[in-house]
Amino acid sequence: MAITTRVTDSEEHVHSTFGTRYVRDPLPRYKMPEKSIPKDAAYQIINDELMLDGNPRLNLASFVTTWMEPECDKLIMASINKNYVDMDEYPVTTELQNRCVNMIAHLFNAPVGESETVIGVGTVGSSEAIMLAGLAFKRKWQQRRRAQGLPCDKPNMITGANVQVCWEKFARYFEVELKEVKLREGYYVMDPEKAVEMVDENTICVAAILGSTLTGEFEDVKALNDLLTKKNAETGWDTPIHVDAASGGFIAPFLYPDLEWDFRLPLVKSINVSGHKYGLVYAGVGWAIWRTKDDLPDDLVFHINYLGADQPTFTLNFSKGSSQIIAQYYQFIRLGFEGYRNIIQNCMENARVLKEGIERTGQFEVLSKDVGVPLVAFMLKDTTKHTVFHIAESLRRFGWIVPAYTMPADAQHIAVLRVVIREDFNRSLAMRLVTDIEKVLGELEVRANRVATKTHVDSDEKLAKKTVEQIQEEVTRHWKKFVQGRKTIVC
Amino acid sequence: MVISKASSESDVSIHSTFASRYVRTSLPRFKMPEASIPKDAAYQIINDELMLDGNPRLNLASFVTTWMEPECDKLIMASINKNYVDMDEYPVTTELQNRCVNMIAHLFNAPLGDSEAAVGVGTVGSSEAIMLAGLAFKRKWQNKMKALGKPYDKPNIVTGANVQVCWEKFARYFEVELKEVKLKDGYYVMDPVKAVEMVDENTICVAAILGSTLNGEFEDVKLLNDLLMAKNKETGWDTPIHVDAASGGFIAPFLYPELEWDFRLPLVKSINVSGHKYGLVYAGIGWVIWRNKEDLPEELIFHINYLGADQPTFTLNFSKGSSQVIAQYYQLIRLGYEGYKNVMENCRENAMVLKEGLEKSGRFNIISKDVGVPLVAFSLKDSSRHDEFEVSDMLRRFGWIVPAYTMPPDAQHVTVLRVVIREDFSRTLAERLVIDILKVLRELDTFPGKIPVATVEEKHPGKTKLFANKSAEEIGRAITTHWRKFVMEKKKMNGVC
């Protein structure tokens, strides 16, 4: 008779997770553990550690969607195990992507006939979309130069200094020189005139931003188009425009349909938009649309035989989940044009409430414009006693994550706080935020006065006698400014 | 008295979805619809259309994971709204990624001290990982050539013709020449001897595959390392190796720990592995690890200030979901070394069951080896009457998705069917698949075989009405088979991934 005894196993099943040894043993951080642990323990341990992450919905730094309807969550979970790239095996999912591309292209007034298919692709985000668009421009420019027998080894592109970091990535990784139009105090977007001045024969494209990350402002793409058309007529260089509509692409068509920024302008050859920003989908989907077939050189496109028909693909990523694409399609048919318009209008309204609350404190100056992405960027009128970095830190105690950052060159002396209004940021939250900002200002005021009194008492002492706190604060502030100055990630 | 009657609105909320008008109106396909529709209707319509997709778990074409434990699904859903790149806001998630990188680096025997941090990053998949690794090699090589005062405008990379399409993408997009070592009948991976011969001073690296997509074979990285070291000594070119361990990286350490293919070999400078293949996570995660800091040129790294500390990042994608990174960490601590080993051993066992079932039928040649990725690649011994594409087609009727494809040059005359054994492919399914394949063969035996058009022409030269005596079905079949062969040959990426 064989008796198999496995005492330890039976104990494990009985004990509640917090009664087992698994929450007592330290988890390895550098090496894979030797043994398995029960799934409940694994779930609990990870779930608990993640409690210390910020709350995504209170993350006012991000444009990226943090809430979707439960029905959509169901669809997402159901398709989480579908590898998007298996087009042959998941033809419906592939078709949903194609439908999304068509819908977005029409939203951007791409010059296509009624049943003509558009040129575009779903990506993992605007970074991938921008790299694809940039690659297309680079290749087209190279082909043109080679045909003319001219050198093609020094391509460059013109952008404003307010570009998001992915443009710098593109430039560095794909060996294109980035020529940035510097900002200046009071003018925080790319100046079309300066941009066109900088265009030379090696310029592969000029990139305009619809919805600058720093202040939410829309750049004047029409002015850029007109100036560049004139220059092209003189030089014959045929320099095109790309519009980085990562944020603005799902705002302008609904709120400002008469604003000409898209394919209605003849020099605009490609546009990217983030599905996961105001496309109202969770992180992980972006879209790149080209004006016509000619704007996407064929030697970049890989042709896959899909169900006997040709499915051209042009992406950097290969395997990836299908969930976000399906979620994007859900939003398009669920909301429709009116739904998107309602939501963005609500966002603008709540942004206005927040802006007015902030202005009412009398201590801030608002930099963001009313026309643009629904966000409020504001700076302190008086930065001698405390800075926006202090405010950002103090707000964290209330649970709010509000980023503070300095502007890029040549406006580095300006530091702002920025609150992005997303779909799920309702009016009560806006008013609560104003209240909390006022509280924080009050606290900082008290602290500043305390320090000032101390300084006054020791005023005949030299600088070396500063309080420890003051020195610490100064050092922190300088270090932060230095590091923030290096930091190019505002997103 | 105000009576507000919004009849259409009340109708909408009362009626069940299938009774409402939403399932009657056609959905726009090219333009966004004007009006909103209720969320239930939107859910139902999309859910129903998606029923016509293949079943992911029966998709035997793919290496990518199609099942995870419900506890992990919970974690995934909970973090679906976290944008991974917000490192400042989600420090724990960032740390989980760092822990995964360290664990995988140690799994690959990276030469690190006890508390030295590994150099690596999480990506969206092996494609991004390979592009990052390739970029690092390209930049290193350019810096080296610049320092020597030599031209650096024609970089190339040496691989086998069996590489996955992402290497061709890398080559095309980053302007590197791809020099492919051709395969031959019976030898379907990169020949290390031929590869080293093709290395010249413009070669930025040689890429070996651990787990070829075509037949699951592991390339002999040790041999490549030894040959390349000898050549480097003669030439002084210092050519490095990259190992594309997309599939094999989570198999070899558990099933074949003595196999030297990773950082134990001195010329291996970077390795990529797909978390979403045998890392046992859903699609959307890969990893790339560098040997040490010197192998990743500093100028490619962007520095983010994260919690006052420096967080270097090197990725192509920016915003993306956090779910898969968390899921990978879950798997690493949930399963541990023994868990992964158990899963891989089961896969290998089930692959054997399938292979033996096919061999017993006497109708197939097995192309895949026993050592390698758990998959079975097989071709018909006699494909004169019916070929592998027809078998693949007919299997679809049973629900199975089994891909058929031709080998790349110079073995294009060989066609194979390939079944990938994943974690969730149990023995019962393996046995059922064998039964269904045999059913398909029996059915095909009763159908008329394809008659090559050329044979008819030879037998009846000059006859203008070549097709007069054939049935419509036979003609249709002949045309389809030829067209398919033609298109398959054109298709660079034969749907093998």
Image (cartoon, coloured by chain):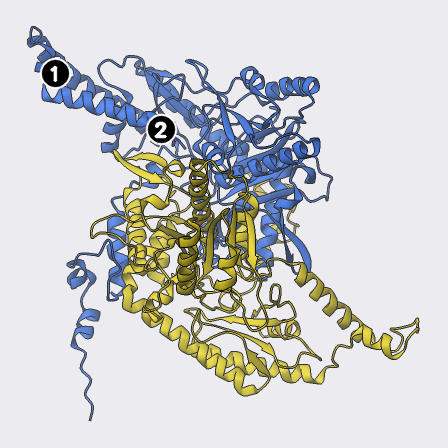
Chain colours: A blue, B yellow
Image location (x, y in percent) of residue B10: 54, 45
User: Dots 2 and 1: beta carbons under 8 Å?
Assistant: no
Which circle's residue, 2 or 1, is located before the other in the chain? 2
Of circles 2 and 1, which is in front? 1
Tell me if residue A491 comes above or below residue B203 in the rendering: above
Q: What's the mark number on residue A450?
A: 1
Tell me if residue B236 comes above or below residue B48 in the rendering: above
**Residue tagged 2:** A430
Image mark 2: chain: A
Residue B241 seen in this snapshot: no
Tell me if residue A309 comes above or below residue A7 in the rendering: above
Image location (x, y in percent) of residue A422: 42, 34
**Distance of mark 2 from mark 1, alpha carbons?**
31 Å
Foreground of the two, B425 or A233: A233
| Amino acid at the residue labelled 1 | Arg
Image mark 1: chain: A
| Amino acid at the residue labelled 2 | Ala
* Number of numbered discs visible in the structure rendering: 2
Q: Quadrant of the N terminus of chain A?
A: bottom left
Image location (x, y in percent) of residue B8: 59, 44
Query: Viewed as shown, does residue B477 lie left or right of A133?
Result: right
Helix, strand or loop under label 1: helix
Q: Quadrant of the C terminus of chain A?
A: top left
Quadrant of residue B16 within the rendered picture:
bottom right
Foreground of the two, B416 or A317: B416
Residue B372 seen in this snapshot: yes
